[in-house]
Amino acid sequence: MSNAFRTLLSKEVKETLRDPKILIGIIIMPMITFGVMGFFMQLSFKSIKEAALKPRMLIIDNDLNTYSQFLISTLKSNTNATLKIFNRTALSNGLKFAEDHNYPIIMVIPENFTQNVTLGLQAKIELYTLFKRLSLSEGSAASMPRALISYLNSYLVDKKLKSLAPNIDTKIFLSPIKTVNFSIIKGRIVNVPPESVVNIITSQSLTMPITVLMVLVFAMQISASSIAIEKEEKTLETLLTLPVSRLSILGSKLISSIIVAAIGSSVYLIGYTYYLGSFSSLSTIETSISAEKIGLTITPLGFTLLGISLFLAITSALVLSIVVAVYAEDVRSAQTLIGYLYFLIFIPSFALMLTDINSLPTPMKIILYIIPYTHPIIASKAALLEDYLTITYGIIYMAFFSLILLYIASRMFTTEKVITAKLSLRFKRKI
Amino acid sequence: MRSTSNLAVEVDNLKKYYGRIKALDGLNFKVYEREIYGLIGPNGAGKTTTLRIIATLLQPTSGHVYVFGHDVVEEAAEVRKIISYLPEEAGAYKNLSGLEYLHFMASFYSKSKDELKIMVEEAVKISGLNERLKDKVKTYSKGMKRRLLIARTLMVHPKLAILDEPTSGLDVIHAYYLRRIIKEYVKTYGVTVLLSSHNMLEVEYLCDRVALIHKGKLVLEGFPSELKSKYEASNLEEVFAKVTQIV
Ligand SMILES: Nc1ncnc2c1ncn2[C@@H]1O[C@H](COP(=O)(O)OP(=O)(O)O)[C@@H](O)[C@H]1O
Ligand SMILES: [Mg+2]
């Protein structure tokens, strides 16, 4: 790296990072946004979990007999529930107390509960869920008593069956057929139900498009601003008469944008991971299955190819935004112009977040394949499936695209175009 | 590289079109080494266009320009090594301090740390901004910025300094300061200066020779005193008025 180039590069990075607009927009805002979002998510999930695991429950026992006692004692000994028990009282009394003392669940055990159970009639328990604040945690408060009742149900079934036929296996009697679930991934059979695989695919197929989207949007903003600010602040002409090659000026802008975009997107990703992490804290009881366990991993080769794919996508986006920003006279109009390019990123990101490219109709498929920023997203899935040919095609296409853009950009920078290019945005002012 | 005796700039039948707008229409002039040469003319005459072509920013539509024998199109990289250009409307990186800006600029011209230090020290002296150089450029007034930029242009001891309206838009105090600095500097280091101005008094004070440009053409060239006596005028402004009436 030549001296002049290093000087240019460090100036670019310094100018960008010292720019309050960029600092706030790219580093501070995402940190705050994701931090706050994640914090509230976690707070809300915590209260949901608490409501589910440690419910406050008001019980009106109108039965006062064997089975109501059994139910209450099981609740007391096996759960963290806070219980308030009223004997023989009207619902309206209980309701008033529950409202005043913040009990979201009222369980009413009717008068002849034990009698009905013993006689083999269907007994009833009434569960009332109070929505006072219309919050999610209120809704989940009933899950614990419901689980308990279903436990009591199977206990009673078991008892009844055993009394009729002592050798019978209650489990088999209740479900004579059991489904055993397998999934076949990359030709290997794994002992995992398809739903779990779907969960993993969903989280993976969300992560890559969002990552690509953020990195590209950042990088484009930064590189476009880096050229537009030179025009706005009237520093470009001086810069272009310095004894440095025009290509190193272009190169320093590209590389500094990559550096700053990398900083920006890692901040974003950290924030995003924290935010997603706040979701996963919800799944407490269900066993989570890791991607590694079922063989959905990326080999070093896949990783390398994916890296190249992402790198080319970033490079071409940077060059594209510089080429476009050359036509703007100030930072604001440059950002407006760049905004028109976002659809190139948003379309593949959102389209492929929810669907697979192969399941789309052919015209849509062709459009997506033409957009270069589709390819790193496809590549992320292909890398998991070890489909390296698909990634390679994408790489070749993006390399071709980048080279053309680089050629255009270097032509602009080595001729007077970089100074004289101008795009009239006058149609805007008419509105 | 053309063999030249003591020619700093040679402009040969220079034409420049911006699309269909004709900015320069066959311009010819020569600037000799160690000379302060001034282009004068009203707004839109083509001064900036001429200087931008000489500074390798724009390409001529036709014609040739040589700077110390180097073609500005074919040997642009060589030309950039020996010139220093002050654009008409120029800024400095606003998030850098004045001193950082000077360091940044000097690093492209200096071959060693010592040389860089000397250049920056010189610029500090030329600018006269003292302690304010430690502040960010965005806190500078227009006059201060122009002083910083002139200092930047001159500190590198170019063979040719190209100054486009060096004092336009400045108040009397700043303008006076800068004119004195430029004149003194040129005497000391013997650099060649090509400048443009629409301020006739400034040109008279600074320039050895002047060229009058009108509608992209050179209409008059000579020493200020010679021109004044030829047109029986007391200053260049009168000369200009008389000539443009004829043209
Ligand atoms: N980028 C440009 N695009 C189109 N026309 C231009 C451009 N720059 C200058 N011109 C035109 O060229 C002519 C000469 O301008 P210029 O060289 O700036 O004159 P001066 O510096 O003497 O005021 C003017 O008519 C001006 O409108
Ligand atoms: Mg001008």
Image (cartoon, coloured by chain):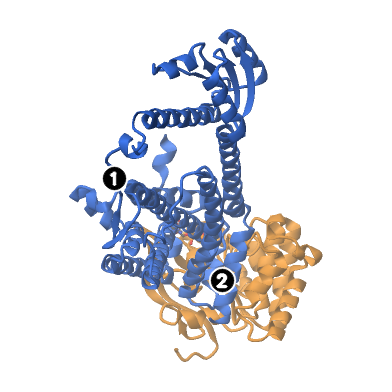
Chain colours: A blue, B orange
Position of A55 relative to A22 (above/below): above
Residue bearing mark 2: A9
Element type where label 2 sits in the image: helix
Residue B9 x/y as whole percent: 51, 80
Q: What chain does badge 1 belong to?
A: A
The picture quadrant where one finds residue A130 is top right
The spot of residue A31 in percent (x, y) is 60, 50
Which of the two labelled residues, at mark 1 and mark 2, occupies the earlier sequence position?
2
A231 versus A199 height, above or below: below
- Horizontal side of B197 relative to A122 (left or right) equals right
Q: Is mark 2 within 8 Å of ligand 1?
A: no
Which circle marks residue A179 in the picture? 1
Q: Is residue A358 left or right of residue B148?
A: left
Neighbours of disc 1 within 10 Å: few (<14), some (14-19), many (20+)? few
Q: Residue pushed farthest left?
A: A362
Lateral position of residue A324 relative to residue B189, left or right: left
Q: Residue furthest right?
A: B131
Q: Residue A307's x, y, as percent?
A: 41, 68
- In percent of the image, x 59 and y 38: which residue is there? A46
Chain of the residue under the numbered disc 2 shown in the image = A
Q: Give the answer, above or below, for where A220 lies relative to B193.
A: above
Rendering quarter of residue A157:
top left
Crowd band around label 2 with a 10 angstrom C-alpha radius: few (<14), some (14–19), many (20+): many
Which label sits in the foreground, 1 or 2?
1
Residue at the image position 26 percent from the left and 57 percent from the top = A369
SS state under label 1: loop
Q: Residue at 52% of width from left, 31% of height from top?
A: A144
Task: Return the mark for residue B51.
Answer: none
| A69 or B205, nearer to the observer | A69
